[in-house]
Image: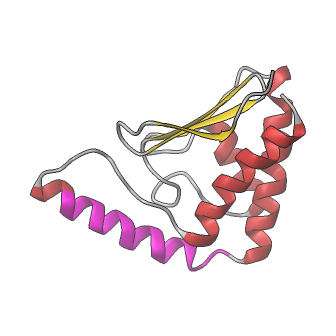
Amino acid sequence: MNEQQARVGARWWADCLRNGSKMDNGDKSEIGGMTLAMAMMLQQSRISKITPEQVDVFETALVDTIMAFEDELWDVLNVDYHANAPLRAAGEKAGIDVDFGVLPMKTTMYFQDDGVQLLYGYGAPVQELLKETG
């Protein structure tokens, strides 16, 4: 794990708190559409109460968490419907409850070699946020 990976990854998640993000659980039914509309309203309501200072603390805490991956069992950040432990821990340090309805559902970020890969939403293709070198 290197610092550039940590900063790229943490910035992406922090930007979701700054700007909102898509909510895609893959349910294309009418009920699924209504569920997603409600999820987006919940997200906007919750992120509107988050201060820029809290987001900065979250981002810094997440960089530290990612850098510690070598010492931990985590090398993935993800949200199914609930955020996984590293994201929740960074949120706790910032006073932000990121467990449900704030971060994009069905989203996974992998840290491998020198790269950062993202699957943003249900069944999403892999995006290279930081391409491996070498």
Which residue reaches farthest front? 134
Q: In this figure, which colouring scheme has been used for the structure?
A: secondary structure
Q: Position of residue 70 (x, y in %)?
A: 83, 22
| Residue at x-position 61% and y-position 65% | 17
Of residues 14 and 80, the one drawn nearer to the viewer in this rendering:
14
Location of residue 47 by image quarter: bottom right
Q: In the displayed structure, does residue 129 sit left or right of residue 101?
A: right
Location of residue 59 with respect to 25 vertically, above or below: below
Q: Position of residue 43 (x, y in %)?
A: 46, 68
Which residue reaches farthest left? 30
Residue 36 is a magenta residue: yes
Q: In the displayed structure, does residue 10 sit left or right of residue 37?
A: right
Q: Position of residue 76 (x, y in %)?
A: 63, 30
Q: Position of residue 111 (x, y in %)?
A: 70, 29
| Residue at x-position 81% and y-position 21% | 134
**Picture mark count:** 0
| Residue at x-position 47% and y-position 74% | 44
| Residue at x-position 20% and y-position 64% | 34
Q: Quadrant of the N terminus?
A: top right
Of residues 15 and 86, the one drawn nearer to the viewer in this rendering:
15
Of residues 4 and 44, the one drawn nearer to the viewer in this rendering:
4
Location of residue 73 with respect to 33 vertically, above or below: above
Residue 132 is a magenta residue: no
The boundaries of the magenta stretch are 33-50
Location of residue 29 with respect to 1 vertically, above or below: below
Is the stretch drawn in magenta largely helix, strand or loop?
A: helix
